[in-house]
Amino acid sequence: MQHSDPRTTTHDAEDRRRLSDRREWPTRALRLPFTPRCRSGFRRQGTELNQFVDQMRPRVFLWGITIVVFCVIDAVLTLIHIERGGEELVPTMKWALDASHEAFVWIKLTLTGVGVAYLAVHQNFFVGKFCIRFVFFVYFFLMVYHAFIVVTRV
């Protein structure tokens, strides 16, 4: 068996690196979701379950943005519904409406935004995968319900 000089082997290994050493730059505490050098996937197939990544998948990003847009539409249509004599059924939102319309909108958007952010961060966990889809479909059917109310109460 032939042994090689360790100095040559180390030098050859460094030459074969495709990327520079990742330890050259300090790790930043906060990163934007789509910045370079953010981990968006995993090296080995099957290891992505219950693991965090630095970047959210585009699909998760779109689902989250759609949920927030649905929330804004829901808030506007709820205020219109209230002005026409309707009633808010969710006790927390009813309390916010009693305070003011601005408080209602801010509390609704804040709770939805924080919830969507939590689910997006947990995109590779069961709770994130299941719940972001569940919330999307709940808001979708809520939009259908609002459309029904608007059409029938003209």
Image (tube, grey):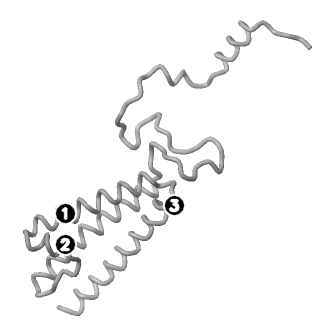
Q: In the rendered image, which residue does mark 2 sit on?
A: 93
Hey, what amino acid is under mark 1? Ile
The quarter holding residue 7 reads: top right
Question: What residue sits 37% from the left and 75% below the top?
Answer: 138
The mark nearer the N terminus, 3 or 1, is 1
Q: In the rendered image, which residue does mark 1 sit on?
A: 107
Q: Are marks 1 and 2 in contact (CB under 8 Å)?
A: yes
Q: Is residue 22 left or right of residue 143?
A: right
Hey, what amino acid is under mark 2? Met
The mark nearer the N terminus, 1 or 2, is 2
Q: Is residue 69 left or right of residue 38?
A: left
The one nearer the camera, 39 or 95, is: 95
Alpha-carbon span between mark 1 and mark 2 = 8 Å
Residue 48: mark: none
Residue 49 location in percent, x, y?
57, 53
Residue 9 location in percent, x, y?
73, 12
Q: Residue furthest bottom?
A: 152
Residue 126: mark: 3
